Image (cartoon, rainbow, N blue to C red):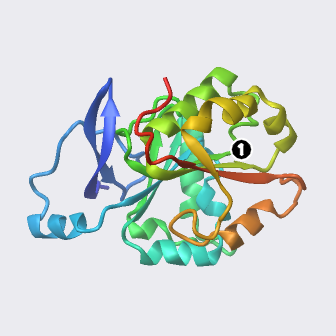
């Protein structure tokens, strides 16, 4: 099955910015294509798309449980209706990335998200501490159950947060969601890092109603509802990148 090319995303590789062509009509993972554009694209259609700047939501460590699976129906409906919103799941484990993709696309009695048909849900096999996106290009960055993941070293977690500071636009939001081992996340070394080093780069956000592009109150409630895997003391933290700080911490 062929790939359908829709729009360029800001991207970098090996220290330089390149164009990441959004492609998603096949079972293949979103490839990193070093091209500046596609001359075969209809110019008029391309100009129409460029009128509205894309709102990019990147989930680092999306793996086998992407953020989209736990969003409310209202969130998903707003996603479907807003052509500017794009979701990109990023994970270093290609097998888990494929598994998560298949869950989002699965259609049975339990799940029918119907989001893949939008052409705005993508997946990239990449390291979270070396994201393939240009500086100041992402609107939201999600770290879900990453800080508490004992298989990820503190150094790599710190690298991921540095990358969040780099790729988020001024005013962009970093969202930290901890459901499985929230106590470990709170006690982890990275917690101290968040409290100190990032104070000059991010500021806490407490109004979840207007933090991102959608009202996430119902999504938050669903994600924090206790279950066999979700602990009663789970939490969601939001931080906004300060507009005056255009560069990540050194």
Judge by depth and name the residue closer to the eye, 244 or 160.
244
How far across and down, in percent of the image, does residue 143 sit?
Answer: 62, 45
Image-quadrant location for residue 121: bottom left
Q: Residue at left 73%, top 54%?
A: 236
How far across and down, in percent of the image, does residue 122 sit?
Answer: 43, 53
Judge by depth and name the residue closer to the eye, 246 or 169.
246
Q: Can residue 110 be spotted in the picture?
A: no
Image-quadrant location for residue 26: bottom left
Q: Residue at left 71%, top 44%?
A: 145
How far across and down, in percent of the image, does residue 124 sit?
Answer: 45, 42
Judge by depth and name the residue closer to the eye, 244 or 206.
244
Task: Give above or below for 50 relative to 191.
Answer: below
Judge by depth and name the residue closer to the eye, 241 or 90.
241
Q: Residue at left 68%, top 60%?
A: 206
Q: Would residue 139 be found to the left or right of residue 104 on screen?
A: left
Label 1 SS? loop
Residue under label 1, please give it: 145
Task: Give above or below for 80 relative to 100.
Answer: below
How far across and down, in percent of the image, does residue 120 sit?
Answer: 40, 62
Q: How crowded is mark 1: few (under 14 residues within 10 Å), some or many (20 or more)?
A: many
């Amino acid at each position: 099955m062929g790939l359908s090319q829709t729009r360029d995303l800001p991207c970098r590789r090996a220290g330089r910015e390149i164009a990441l062509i959004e492609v998603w009509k096949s079972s293949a993972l979103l490839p990193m294509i070093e091209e500046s554009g596609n001359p075969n694209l209809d110019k008029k259609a391309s100009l129409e798309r460029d009128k509205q700047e894309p709102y990019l939501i990147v989930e680092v460590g999306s793996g086998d449980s992407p953020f989209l699976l736990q969003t409310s129906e209202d969130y998903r409906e707003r996603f479907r209706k807003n052509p500017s919103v794009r979701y990109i799941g990023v994970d270093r484990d290609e097998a888990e990335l494929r598994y998560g993709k298949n869950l989002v696309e699965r259609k049975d009695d339990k799940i029918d998200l119907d989001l893949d048909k939008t052409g705005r849900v993508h997946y990239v096999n990449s390291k979270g501490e070396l994201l393939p996106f240009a500086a100041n290009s992402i609107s939201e960055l999600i770290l879900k159950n990453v800080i508490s993941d004992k298989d990820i070293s503190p150094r790599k977690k710190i690298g991921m947060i540095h990358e969040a500071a780099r790729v988020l636009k001024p005013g962009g939001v970093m969202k930290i969601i901890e459901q499985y081992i929230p106590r470990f996340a709170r006690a982890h070394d990275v917690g101290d890092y968040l409290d100190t080093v990032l104070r000059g780069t991010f500021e806490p956000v407490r109004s979840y109603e207007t933090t991102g592009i959608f009202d996430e109150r119902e999504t938050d409630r669903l994600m924090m509802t206790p279950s066999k895997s979700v602990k009663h003391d789970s939490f969601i933290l939001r931080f906004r990148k300060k507009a005056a700080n255009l560069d990540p911490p050194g």
